Image: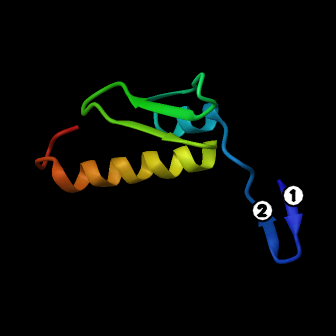
Amino acid sequence: MSQAPDGPVPAEPTAADIQRDHPHWRTWVGVDRLCHGLRTQGAALTARSEDWQGLLDEIRSAEAMLEDTRPRGWP
């Protein structure tokens, strides 16, 4: 982690970071050079972005949307 004048700057997440934090998702770089994510359990969701940070944001957004729409008690 690098040090900025006003505090530490978080590092760009990697595919391994995303898969560790979101074990229901599989991540990869496609032939289109985009970062892709696929939810492998529960609701079938996909996400893609130009970089890992963007993919992480898309996954978080998809998970939040899922939380808001699924019945209480569903995984």
Q: Callout 1, which amino acid? A: Ser
Left or right: where 26 falls relative to 8: left
Give 9 or 50, whichever is nearer the viewer. 50
Image spot of residue 64 (x, y percent): 33, 54
Q: Which residue is drawn at 35% across and 47% down?
A: 63
Give 55 or 10, whichever is nearer the viewer. 55
Query: Among all residues in the image, which is located at the extreme left?
Result: 71
Q: What element carries label 2?
A: strand
Query: Among all residues in the image, which is located at the extreme bottom?
Result: 6
Residue 9's tag is 2
Q: What element carries label 1?
A: strand
Q: Callout 2, which amino acid? A: Val
Residue 17, placed above or below residue 12:
above
- The quadrant in which residue 52 appears is top right
Give 13 or 55, whichever is nearer the viewer. 55
Image spot of residue 47 (x, y percent): 43, 39
> What's the distance in space between the residues labelled 1 and 2, CA to CA?
6 Å
Image spot of residue 29 (x, y percent): 60, 27
Are the residues at dot 1 and dot 2 in contact (C-beta closer than 8 Å)? Answer: yes
Q: Residue at x 41, y 29 (%)?
A: 38
Nearest to N terminus: mark 1 or mark 2? 1
Q: Which residue is drawn at 31% across and 26% down?
A: 41
Q: Residue at x 14, y 44 (%)?
A: 73
Left or right: where 45 falls relative to 30: left
Residue at the spot of label 1 = 2
